[in-house]
Amino acid sequence: MKNLILYCLVTLNSISAFAQNKEIDRLYSIYKDDSTIVIYSTFGEIYADIYIKKNADNKPESIIIRGNSNNLNGIIEIVTGLVKQKIQQGYTKTSGSSHEYIRSRLEKQKEIKDIQARNSAAASMNLDNSGFEAVYRKGDDYFIISINYGVYYSRTIDVSRSGLTTSLPPEIKHSEYTFSLENGDNSRKGGAKARPLDF
């Protein structure tokens, strides 16, 4: 009888320890020693920074991978793969764009960029640079994708000709996509040591 009680206690303890293994802790164990990451795709490497937010108890509450790249094919592949992975893990989209919409919108931007690269007359074609994001949730866990497109211009040049000053329009210096991928746990927000504001 004592052996049965001991066995039950050990089993319950093991189940309790297993239940406390959170996804955020698993990800933290992977990224805790890194500040940058190289993400590999079939279209090349993309470099990104890693940010870890901790709560008042010094436990991880979210991990963010953020980077910039002109490698649109790589970003499409990475984002699409991550969304599929999260859906397979049981996450559901709670707000923002669907992953099909994100993919189609990024692919449309890629088409425009490809046309612009082949034809200088198409340089005036408008790339939609408004950002978009999607939020996926599973219980207290969440996954947020955010992608923005930025065009960076050289400064305006003033040219003097026969005493008249003319401003030439700025030229596109470069353009790139900024992406942010965040995994977090809402149950960790604040922590046990956090106090409400008393003002």
Image (spheres, rainbow, N blue to C red):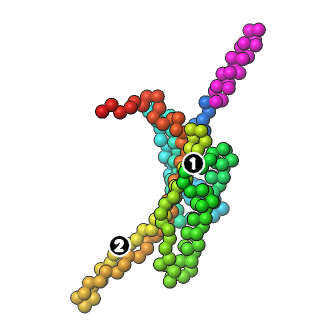
Residue 10 highlighted magenta (yes or no): yes
Left or right: 157 as drawn, with respect to 143: left
Residue 138: x %, y % from top left? 61, 42
Determine the residue positioned at 47% across, 41% down.
Answer: 53
**Chain-order first, disc 1 or disc 2:** 1
Which is more toward the observer, 99 or 81? 99
**10 Å neighbourhood of mark 1: few (<14), some, or many (≥20)?**
few
**Quadrant in which the C terminus appears:** top left
Left or right: 101 as drawn, with respect to 132: right
Determine the residue positioned at 63% across, 27% down.
Answer: 17
The alpha-carbon separation of the residues under discs 1 and 2 comes to 41 Å
Circle 2 residue:
155
Kindly identify the amino acid type of the residue bearing the numbered disc 1: Thr
Vertical placement of residue 85 versus 193, above or below: below
Element marked by disc 2: loop
Q: Which residues are magenta?
A: 1-19
Circle 1 residue:
94
Q: Main secondary structure of the magenta part?
A: helix
**10 Å neighbourhood of mark 2: few (<14), some, or many (≥20)?**
few
Single out the mark in the foreground, 1 or 2.
1
Q: Quadrant of residue 81?
A: bottom right
Which is more toward the observer, 142 or 177? 142
